[in-house]
Image (cartoon, grey):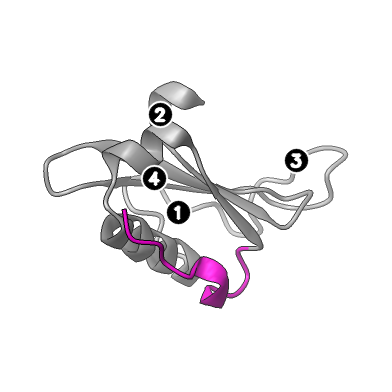
């Protein structure tokens, strides 16, 4: 699978892709989803409430996005509130 330089996606921190997501999703699908997530397009998830939900003891908001590939495979993108980390995963891996 060709490698994509995800480091240009600002504001997402370190990007981690689970092994199952890497096998199930094309690099282009992942890149498109990360771009949408970075822009605040949460896909199939409802947009967060104004001010977003605060997570106790973490001091920030977790950003959740849900997308589908062209063949209908569901996957999520989660940016953590407490660390500069974004994870791409399949729902069953959560």
Q: Secondary structure at mark 1?
A: loop
- Residue identified by numbered label 4: 45
Residue drawn at x 59%, y 75% is 10
Marks 3 and 1 in Cβ contact (< 8 Å): no
Which sits earlier in the primary sequence, circle 1 or circle 2? 1
Query: Quick one: label 2, few (<14), some, or many (20+) residues within 10 Å?
Result: few
Which sits earlier in the primary sequence, circle 3 or circle 2? 3
Out of 77 and 40, give the one closest to the viewer: 77
Residue drawn at x 53%, y 73% is 9
Give the spatial CA distance, label 3 vs label 4.
Answer: 18 Å
Give the spatial CA distance, label 4 vs label 2.
Answer: 13 Å
- Residue identified by numbered label 2: 91
Give the spatial CA distance, label 1 vs label 2.
Answer: 18 Å
Q: Tell me, yes or no, whether the highlighted magenta stretch contains residue 3.
A: yes
Horizontal and vertical percent position of residue 71: 11, 41
In the image, is 23 to the left or to the right of 14? left
Instruction: Name the outermost residue toward the right.
Output: 57
Give the spatial CA distance, label 3 vs label 1.
Answer: 16 Å
Which sits earlier in the primary sequence, circle 3 or circle 1? 1
């Amino acid at each position: 699978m060709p490698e994509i330089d995800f480091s240009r996606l600002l504001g997402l921190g370190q990007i981690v892709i689970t092994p199952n997501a890497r096998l199930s999703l094309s690099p282009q699908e992942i890149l498109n989803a990360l771009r949408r997530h970075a822009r605040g397009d949460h896909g199939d998830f409802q947009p967060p409430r104004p001010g977003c939900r605060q997570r106790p003891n973490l001091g920030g908001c977790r950003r959740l996005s849900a997308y589908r590939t062209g063949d209908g495979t569901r996957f999520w993108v989660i940016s953590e509130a407490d660390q500069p980390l974004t994870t791409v995963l399949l729902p069953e891996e959560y």
